[in-house]
Image (tube, rainbow, N blue to C red):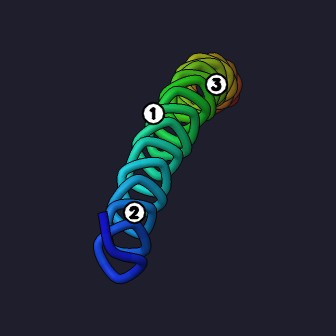
Amino acid sequence: MSRHTENKEEILKIYGSIDLINQRIDNIENNHLKHIQKSIDRIQWVMTVIGLGVLGQVLVLVTNHL
């Protein structure tokens, strides 16, 4: 095998490894993003419940003063 062919094969192996690493990084990022999105959704739900509770108390306060 010539040196040129060996170099070409090694370069292809390196590119294959880089592609595999990129796929793993993408999977890790997507997994973390899913967890972050789940946490944000939970926080939004809690804030909505708290907001509705406060709104209910304000309505009770207003109707008691009328």
> At label 3, which amino acid type do we have?
Ser
Q: Residue 61, relative to residue 24: is it above or below?
A: above
Q: Look at the numbered disc 3 and give the secondary structure of its residue.
A: helix
Residues at marks 1 and 3 touching, judged by CB atoms closer than 8 Å: no
For residue 34, say whether it is visible.
Answer: yes
**Count of numbered circles on the image:** 3
Mark 3 highlights which residue?
Answer: 39
Whichever of callouts 1 and 2 sits on the residue coming sooner in the sequence is 2
- Measure how far apart labels 2 and 3 are at the Cα level: 36 Å
Q: Quadrant of residue 39?
A: top right
49 with respect to 2 (left or right): right
The quadrant the N terminus occupies is: bottom left
Which one is in front, 14 or 52?
A: 14
> At label 2, which amino acid type do we have?
Tyr
> At label 1, which amino acid type do we have?
Asn
Sort mark 3 into few (<14), some (14-19) or many (20+) by Cα contacts within 10 Å.
few
Mark 2 highlights which residue?
Answer: 15
For residue 60, say whether it is visible.
Answer: no
State which mark lies toward you, 1 or 2: 2
Q: Residue 26, relative to residue 49: is it above or below?
A: below
Sort mark 1 into few (<14), some (14-19) or many (20+) by Cα contacts within 10 Å.
few
The quadrant the C terminus occupies is: top right
- Measure how far apart labels 1 and 2 are at the Cα level: 18 Å
Q: Residue 18, relative to residue 43: is it above or below?
A: below
Image position, residue 8 (x, y; %): 33, 73
Sort mark 2 into few (<14), some (14-19) or many (20+) by Cα contacts within 10 Å.
few
Disc sitting over residue 27 in the figure:
1
